[in-house]
Image (cartoon, grey):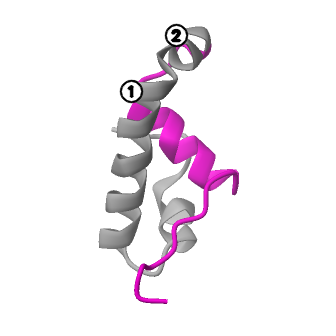
Amino acid sequence: MMIDPPIDKLIKKAECRYALVCGVAKRARQLDAQYPELLKEAGMKSISYAAKEVYEDKIVIRSENV
């Protein structure tokens, strides 16, 4: 269960839950492939790190229809 960042505030960062899940998952895969040393230093799993980035507005989830 994810406690940090709070899920109720994280949901507000995307237009819908589906977009949030897709965006966080895409960023987590990117972190696994390109920045494994970053995850090792942070001591976090890629999905938690990606969610934290979205919560802190380091990564913006946007719709591709725009």
Q: In the visual, does 57 lie left or right of 60? A: right
- Image coordinates of residue 28 in percent, x first then y, are 40, 39
Q: Secondary structure at mark 2?
A: helix
Question: Residue 37 is drawn in which quadrant?
Answer: top right
- Image coordinates of residue 21 in percent, x first then y, are 33, 59
The residue under label 2 is: 40
What kind of residue is marked 1? Ala
Camera-nearest label, 2 or 1: 1
Residue visible at 52% across and 19% down? 39
- Image coordinates of residue 41 in percent, x first then y, are 61, 10
Q: Find the magenta span and give its range.
A: 42-66
53 part of magenta stretch: yes
Dot placed on the residue nearer the N-terminal end, 2 or 1: 1
64 part of magenta stretch: yes
Residue visible at 46% across and 81% down? 15
Q: Secondary structure at mark 1?
A: helix
- Report crowding for label 2: few under 14, some 14 to 19, many 20 or more residues within 10 A (C-alpha): few
Q: Which mark is residue 60?
A: none
What kind of residue is marked 2? Lys
Q: Image quadrant for the N terminus?
A: top left
- Image coordinates of residue 44 in percent, x first then y, are 49, 21
